Image (spheres, rainbow, N blue to C red):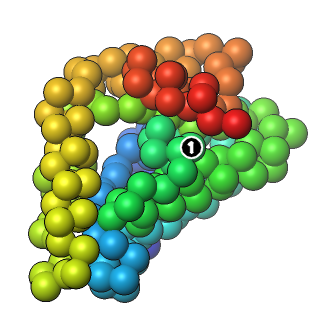
Amino acid sequence: MTDAGSVAQAVSAVLEADARIDVLVNNAGIARMGAVETLGIDDARSVFETNLFGPLRLIQAVLPGMRERAEGVVVNVSSMGGRLPGSPANWAYSASKHALGSLSDSLAEEVRPFGIRVVCVEPGFFRTDVVRKGGRLPKGSPYRDLEKQVAAWYSAGVATGGDPAVVGAAIVAAVEDPATPLHLPVGADAVSAISGVS
């Protein structure tokens, strides 16, 4: 999803096989830890490429067909981290997921007249590889202790998190239920944390 050619090829293949795309689920995500001063621009950019621009590419590729048929559902999987204040050393992930939530807000208003729904799913901690695939912490960082502490906290949260099948079931239910709200926290931790945000 970070490659425009690959996105175009995938969408073409689906349309050739099924003639239409009724539901788009943007579920990819990565996290790269590092303080603002030490996380390299390329690392930060890779987080935004996957968590924000990847979904944007796919949305732009499937919306014309949904608009023509006046129906469709776009599900963007964000995170409770996108609704909470940014955490130290995990700002790139939080910022990219916040941006995905904001994109979802705008998109929902834009496509509502065309009969298209948007749902922004905001899971709490679930057992996924999002942290493990994030790569190493920046070398020689003056924030090393903080970065290690935050990385350990997130790793523990993911390791003891819920079954990802719960998020899958929530996505299916959201697609099937037109009354699903635009922002959908999933998991007791997400519901509790987000409800406390003013």
Q: Where does the image place residue 9, in percent across and percent down from the top left? A: 38, 63
Vertical position of residue 142 compared to residue 115: above or below? below
- Residue at 48% across, 56% down: 86
**Which residue is nearer to you in this view: 5 or 96?**
96
**Which residue is nearer to you in this view: 159 or 75?**
159
Quarter assignment of residue 5: bottom left
Regarding mark 1 in the picture, which secondary structure is present there?
loop
Q: Residues within 10 Å of mark 1 (few under 14, many from 20)?
A: many
Vertical position of residue 5 compared to residue 157: above or below? below
Task: For the C terminus, give its image quadrant.
Answer: top right
Q: Report whether 29 appears left or right of 113.
A: left
Q: Report whether 163 appears left or right of 106.
A: left
**Which residue is nearer to you in this view: 89 or 114?**
89
- Residue at 51% across, 22% down: 191
Q: Where does the image place residue 75, in percent across and percent down from the top left? A: 53, 37
Furthest residue in direction right, as rendered: 113
Q: Is residue 113 visible to the viewer in this orientation of the structure? A: yes
Vertical position of residue 148 compared to residue 130: above or below? below
* Residue type, mark 1 in image: Arg
Q: Where does the image place residue 24, in percent across and percent down from the top left? A: 50, 41
Q: Is residue 50 visible to the viewer in this orientation of the structure? A: no
- Residue at 60% across, 29% down: 196
Task: For the N terminus, give its image quadrant.
Answer: bottom left
Vertical position of residue 73 compared to residue 86: above or below? above
Quarter assignment of residue 139: bottom left
- How many numbered marks are there? 1
**Which residue is nearer to you in this view: 152 or 41?**
152
Q: Report whether 118 appears left or right of 139.
A: right
- Residue at 57% across, 37% down: 120
Q: Where does the image place residue 158, in percent across and percent down from the top left? A: 21, 36
Residue at the disc numbered 1: 83
